[in-house]
Image (spheres, rainbow, N blue to C red):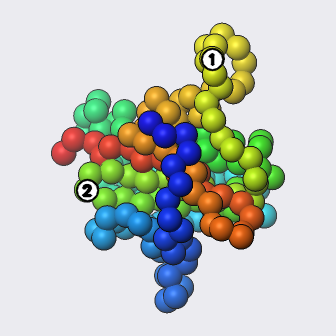
Amino acid sequence: MSTTRQHPPGGLGREPDGTGTTASAAPADRQWRTLSLRDASGIVPTARDFARQALHDWGWLPATGADRRAAAEDVLLVVSELVTNACLHADGPEELRLGHSPKALRVEVVDGGAGQPAPRTPHRAGRPGGHGMFIVQRLCLDWGVTRTPDAPGKTVWAELAAPPA
């Protein structure tokens, strides 16, 4: 799994029609949801509620079995961890993006920070704090950071497998 995969800047941002969807170097059949977190209060619960609603709309919830329930809970945990990391280490998140395709779900958190997220190495389970990116690394198919040249901030992204049908 990559901790930093430099992808070409691929038009991340709002579509010109203002629908709030985003484009990405991703499958063409990916559906996007975007939530602005600028000046939001209760950022982590707001992000989780937004993700929960998207999972409901995309048929991941209500979960009909243990595998589907676990997949949905993994998404909610990854959203929480990435948004919390942006709150703690990057002056807060600016935007949460969720992209759904038949095979995977992509979580993207945009922030204005210059830092580089990384799992704490070595990971010590009994030590408080510092587990967020380790959790993301363990739950996701892949994750990384995308930066736009000559622009501040970054997008931290993670992809999780879609639950079995």
Given residues 118 and 47, the one toward you in this image is 118
| 121 sits to left or right of 28 | right
Q: Are marks 1 and 2 in contact (CB under 8 Å)?
A: no
- Residue at 30% of width from left, 54% of height from top? 59
Amino acid type at image mark 1: Pro
User: How far from the left and from the top, in percent, is residue 28?
Assistant: 30, 70
User: How far from the left and from the top, in percent, is residue 157?
Assistant: 52, 51
Name the image quarter holding residue 127.
Answer: top right
Quadrant containing the N terminus in the rendered view: top left
The kind of secondary structure element at disc 1 is loop
Residue identifier under label 1? 122
Residue 78's disc is none
Query: Which of pointers 1 and 2 lies earlier in the amino acid sequence?
Result: 2
Report the Cα–Cα distance between label 1 and label 2: 35 Å
Q: Is residue 74 visible?
A: no
The kind of secondary structure element at disc 2 is loop
- Residue at 33% of width from left, 43% of height from top? 161
User: How far from the left and from the top, in percent, is residue 150?
Assistant: 71, 70
**Mark 2 nearby-residue class (10 Å; few <14, some 14–19, many ≥20):** some
- Which residue is outermost to the left? 165
Residue identifier under label 2? 102
- Which residue is outermost to the bottom? 17
Which of labels 1 and 2 is toward the front? 1
Q: Is residue 12 visible?
A: yes
Given residues 157 and 58, the one toward you in this image is 157
Amino acid type at image mark 2: Pro
- Residue at 69% of width from left, 27% of height from top? 130
